[in-house]
Image (spheres, rainbow, N blue to C red):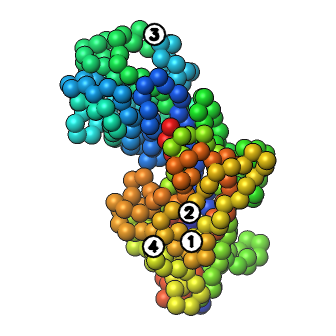
């Protein structure tokens, strides 16, 4: 996960700050299927080779199956059921566990889950914990098949899947870069940069255009950037989203800090606190806080359409940051909803996200940090 780091070196009324903001992007992309609908996979981390990752898999089955089974087979070469499957290098489900209501069968492998349980003719959710992500950036596909007979599911192979009831595929792209795109019939393209972005996330240079923001005053070559007490410092990045998902897409903002703000090294306390869902950051009464604003979405290129709206309490004017606790808001497992397409497709919609921070005279000197991620999820 790329990170946002704030550094403070206190000298009289100055606080040194070296600020690096890199927003990891994640792009679930889903492929068409005959009967399974509303397919999506949300990841708690999009970083390659990350361990202990949580995959939340949702699918709507056409047929209810009591004491049935589902196969979820991850492949790096193709989403098409019945074709040979090449397991993604480095992906490991061996130590993974699944949520209540499902039993992981012995036929499961490092890249395939065989799960037994009741399948509803409605939304089914499987939470898989303890996954190790693939070791290389790129696309992988999840083939999802439901079975009336668990023994048939246990005998599944990619080339001979057997007699299954419903099927569908999901495509996911994992990357450490800034520009992320991919398409398998249905598509989602999401990218972040330090400048306005051309249509379809074109022309982004991974180094020159990386979303790195320095907040504070430049004290000269070799000197740290500093935050002067009771001054508001801001910096922006740009995010662009396109998807043809029938159910649209949502972008979540996630922070690694359990207290939601900027943590001083050696502690687990946010001495620069999150602004909260109803607060703001300014140079006077609300200094010593950290938040962001989200500008109205703009269209990029002639093919732009749809919406990319702010969600929840996020504002175009107030520097807010929705933190409740480690289970709700930006510090929760899947983060806090920041942007959404209002449940419909959208194309080449772009927003400016501006981060704001203000120290005060009582902010302890030290090194502050937090890791932030943007995770985009489509529903097809």
Q: Where is residue 159 in the image (x, y as percent from the top left)?
A: 45, 10
Q: Quick check: 374 above or below 235?
A: above
Measure how far apart labels 1 and 4 are at the Cα level: 10 Å
Q: Could you say which disc has been placed on residue 315 in the image?
A: 1
Q: Mark 2 points at which residue?
A: 310
**Residues at discs 4 and 2 in contact (Cβ within 8 Å):** no
Secondary structure under tag 3 reads loop
Sequence-wise, which precedes: disc 3 or disc 1? 3
Measure how far apart labels 1 and 2 are at the Cα level: 7 Å
Measure how far apart labels 3 and 1 are at the Cα level: 51 Å
Sequence-wise, which precedes: disc 2 or disc 3? 3
Q: Could you say which disc has been placed on residue 159 in the image?
A: 3
**Residues at discs 1 and 4 in contact (Cβ within 8 Å):** no
Is residue 107 toward the left or the right of residue 224 in the image?
A: left
- In front: label 4 or label 2: 2
Secondary structure under tag 4 reads loop
Sequence-wise, which precedes: disc 1 or disc 4? 4
Q: Where is residue 24 in the image (x, y as percent from the top left)?
A: 57, 51
**Residues at discs 4 and 3 in contact (Cβ within 8 Å):** no
Sequence-wise, which precedes: disc 1 or disc 2? 2
Q: Name the residue under label 4.
A: 277
Measure how far apart labels 2 and 3 are at the Cα level: 44 Å
Label 4 packing within 10 angstroms: few (<14), some (14-19), many (20+): some
Sequence-wise, which precedes: disc 4 or disc 2? 4
**Residues at discs 3 and 1 in contact (Cβ within 8 Å):** no
Q: Residue at x 65, y 39 (%)?
A: 181
Front residue of 83/211: it is 83
Residue 244 visible in image? yes
Q: Which residue is drawn at 61% across and 76% down?
A: 317
């Amino acid at each position: 996960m790329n990170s946002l780091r704030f550094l403070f070196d206190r000298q009289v009324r100055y606080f040194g700050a070296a600020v690096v903001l890199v927003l990891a992007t994640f792009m679930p992309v889903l492929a068409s299927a005959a009967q399974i609908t509303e397919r999506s996979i949300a990841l708690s981390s999009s970083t390659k080779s990350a361990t202990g990752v949580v995959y939340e898999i949702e699918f709507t089955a056409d047929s209810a199956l009591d004491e049935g089974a589902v196969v979820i087979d991850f492949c790096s070469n193709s989403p098409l059921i019945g074709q040979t499957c090449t397991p993604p290098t480095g992906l490991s489900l061996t130590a993974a566990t699944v949520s209540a209501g499902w039993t992981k069968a012995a036929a499961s492998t490092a890249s395939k889950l065989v799960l037994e349980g009741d399948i509803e003719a409605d939304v089914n959710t499987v939470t898989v914990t303890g996954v190790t992500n693939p070791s290389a950036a790129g696309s992988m596909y999840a083939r999802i098949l439901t079975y009336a007979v668990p023994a048939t599911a246990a005998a599944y192979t990619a080339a001979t899947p057997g007699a299954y009831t419903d099927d569908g595929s999901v495509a996911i792209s994992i990357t450490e870069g800034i520009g992320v795109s991919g398409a398998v019939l249905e598509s989602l393209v999401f990218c972040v940069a330090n400048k306005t972005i051309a249509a379809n996330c074109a022309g982004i240079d991974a180094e020159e255009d990386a979303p790195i923001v320095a907040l504070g005053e430049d004290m000269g070559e070799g000197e740290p950037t500093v935050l002067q007490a009771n001054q508001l410092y801001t910096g922006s990045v740009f995010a662009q989203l396109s998807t043809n998902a029938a159910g649209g897409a949502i972008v979540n903002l996630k922070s690694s800090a359990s207290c939601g703000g900027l943590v001083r090294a050696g502690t687990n306390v946010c001495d620069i606190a999150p602004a909260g869902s109803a607060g703001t950051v300014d140079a006077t009464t609300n200094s010593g806080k950290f938040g962001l604003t989200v500008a109205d979405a703009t269209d990029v290129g002639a093919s732009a359409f749809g919406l990319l709206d702010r969600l929840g309490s996020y504002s175009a004017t107030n520097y807010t940051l929705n933190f409740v606790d480690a289970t709700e808001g930006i510090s929760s497992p899947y983060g806090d909803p920041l942007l959404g397409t209002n449940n419909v497709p959208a194309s080449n919609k772009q927003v400016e996200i501006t981060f704001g921070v203000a120290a005060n005279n009582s902010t302890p000197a030290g090194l502050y940090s937090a890791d932030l991620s943007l995770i985009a999820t489509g529903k097809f």
